[in-house]
Structure formats: structure tokens, C-alpha cells
């Protein structure tokens, strides 16, 4: 049995269907929103949707950018209460429930285990969608994409059966889990990923340029990117361009030695001086 099911017409429907992304053109209209507390309830919800011939969709962080993320015309299965997390201390392998947001996952790993996983910078984004969709973040140049760390998943298939996918079992589904994003043909309930010791020091440089320098900055930055992306330098770098009056070039160095910081400073200065006009 499932305790929390909200259908169209009920007073709590608008709240239940709402996405975190409040863009005015995103108005999902699922037939029902089912908030589950465990894998068995996910199975029940999928089997019910299948019996009625409607789509079942996973919702973890509710941060989708399109109406399709809201499962209009189908059954939205809300996973936010799947909050289990265990760590194998010797190997730093983490098993976590699909309901975690990135902020919840990062907080638990850091405060309880001094660990980190590579992922995005927005705390409210669902970890499930980010890991399934590759997931680039500040530790990517050091530890790879979020999907690179996946060692296995538990998921409910279209028949409502609980399955496991890893390198040895259902390897095709395992391949899909490492970057397939919203097209993964199942509802993931738990991830097994490789974590890493959290950085303890951070060295940062932030350079700002006027918008007319954007093209020169990008060309210069890209020419140095293969070298800066080498994990030996333990750094993160990117360029941000929004609808603003400046272009930003921030870079970070994680747990860097004096020699690494010296190289880091020299590289950032080289790029900034080649572009000119920055501050």
C-alpha cells in the first residue's frame, strides 16, 4: 500500500505537482503524484501505472527544465523520501537513496565521513538526475564526471520488478545509467558510487573581463584547457557568461602544494595577460 497519493482535483494537487523550477511555462499535469517511502512502493506505483496504460516517471529533485519532467498525463513517482546512505569505509564506496538532493548528499558525506563525490554546484538539484545525466562540477577535472563514479544501481523496471545493474549484471542498463539521463528505462532507487576524500584547502582566483573580451578569452582558455584539465594540477576552471556586463573566469586549486599553487597562478596570469583588459 502507498500512503500518499494525490490526484487531480484534490486541494493538495497544485503543491504536489509543483517543480522547483518555477518558470511560468512549466505547468506539469500528472494524473497523480505518488510519494513513496521505499522500493516496494515504487514497484506498486509502476505496476498500477502499467495496468492503466499510462507512463510512470521518476521525480527526485523536481528540478527539470521542461514540462516532460513533470510527467503530464502519467503518474509522477516522488522519490524524495529515499534517503538511505551507507559507506564502505575501506573502499570509500557509497550507497545512497535516489531521493537525495546534491546538498543533502554532499552534507552527509562531508560531515559524517569526510568524503565527496564530483557533481554540480546547485544544492537543490536532485542527485539522481545529475548522476544519470553525466554531471559536471567543480571536482570533474580531478575525479571525472558524476556518472564516471557509478558502480551500480538498483532500479524498478517497466514491469515493476526490482533489478540491479552493474558491470556484471544487466550491463546494458549499467551503460545506460552512466549518462543516459532521463531516458534511463527504469526508476532508479539506489546508487552505488565511488567517493573520494574531501579537499581540506582551497586556493582561488577570479578574473573578470568586459563582454567584448569574451571571444578572446574563450579562445585563449580553450587552448590551455587540456593542460589545466590534467588531474596532476588538481584544479577546476570554467568561464561563465550570463546576460550581464562582464565575463567571469574563476579557477580553483584543491589541496595544492606550494609548487602546484605557483603553477596555477602562472597559468591563470598567462591567460589573463594574453586576453588583456581583465581585473
Image (spheres, rainbow, N blue to C red):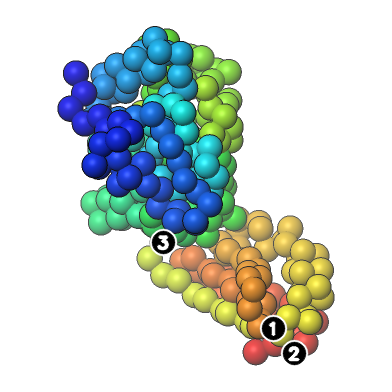
* Residue that carries the numbered disc 3 in the rendered image: 199
Residue 200's image quarter? bottom left
Task: Kindly indicate whether the residue at mark 1 contacts the one at mark 2 (C-beta within 8 angstroms).
Answer: yes
Residue 246's image quarter? bottom right
In which quadrant will I find the N terminus?
top left
Q: Residue 100 in the image: x percent, y percent?
A: 33, 43
Q: Is residue 229 left or right of residue 160?
A: right
Other residues around mark 2 within 10 Å, as few (<14) / some (14–19) / many (≥20): few
| Frontmost residue, 170 versus 126 | 126
* Residue that carries the numbered disc 2 in the rendered image: 277
Compared with 171, 176 (above or below) is below
Compared with 19, 214 (above or below) is below
**Residue drawn at (39%, 57%), measured in percent from left and top?**
123
> Please, what secondary structure does the residue beneath circle 1 have?
strand
- Give whichever of discs 2 and 1 has the lower sequence position: 1
Other residues around mark 3 within 10 Å, as few (<14) / some (14–19) / many (≥20): some
- Give whichever of discs 2 and 3 has the lower sequence position: 3
Q: Residue 116 in the image: x percent, y percent?
A: 39, 52
* Residue that carries the numbered disc 1 in the rendered image: 209
Residue 29, visible in the rendered structure: yes
Amino acid at each position: 500500500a502507498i500512503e500518499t497519493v494525490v490526484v487531480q482535483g484534490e486541494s493538495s494537487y497544485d503543491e504536489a505537482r509543483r517543480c522547483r523550477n518555477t518558470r511560468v511555462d512549466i505547468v506539469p499535469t500528472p494524473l497523480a503524484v505518488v510519494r513513496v517511502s521505499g522500493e516496494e512502493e515504487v514497484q506498486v506505483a509502476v505496476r498500477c501505472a502499467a495496468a492503466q496504460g499510462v507512463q510512470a516517471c521518476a521525480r527526485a529533485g523536481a528540478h527539470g527544465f521542461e514540462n516532460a519532467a513533470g510527467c503530464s498525463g502519467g503518474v509522477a513517482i516522488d522519490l524524495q523520501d529515499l534517503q538511505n546512505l551507507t559507506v564502505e569505509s575501506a573502499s570509500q564506496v557509497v550507497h545512497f537513496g535516489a531521493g537525495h538532493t546534491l546538498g543533502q548528499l554532499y552534507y552527509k558525506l562531508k560531515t559524517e565521513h569526510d568524503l565527496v563525490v564530483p557533481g554540480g554546484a546547485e544544492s537543490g538539484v536532485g542527485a539522481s538526475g545529475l548522476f544519470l545525466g553525466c554531471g559536471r562540477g567543480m571536482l570533474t577535472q580531478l575525479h571525472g564526471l558524476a556518472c564516471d563514479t557509478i558502480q551500480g544501481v538498483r532500479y524498478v523496471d517497466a514491469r515493476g520488478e526490482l533489478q540491479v545493474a552493474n558491470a556484471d549484471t544487466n550491463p546494458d542498463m549499467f551503460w545506460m545509467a552512466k549518462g543516459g539521463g532521463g531516458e534511463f528505462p527504469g526508476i532508479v532507487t539506489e546508487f552505488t558510487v565511488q567517493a573520494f576524500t574531501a579537499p581540506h584547502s582551497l586556493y582561488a582566483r577570479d578574473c573578470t573581463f568586459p563582454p567584448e573580451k569574451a571571444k578572446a578569452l574563450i579562445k585563449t582558455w580553450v587552448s590551455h584547457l587540456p593542460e589545466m584539465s590534467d588531474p596532476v594540477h588538481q584544479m577546476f576552471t570554467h568561464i561563465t557568461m550570463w546576460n550581464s556586463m562582464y565575463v567571469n573566469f574563476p579557477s580553483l586549486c584543491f589541496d595544492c602544494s606550494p609548487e602546484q599553487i605557483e603553477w596555477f597562478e602562472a597559468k591563470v596570469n598567462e591567460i589573463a595577460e594574453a586576453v588583456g583588459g581583465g581585473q
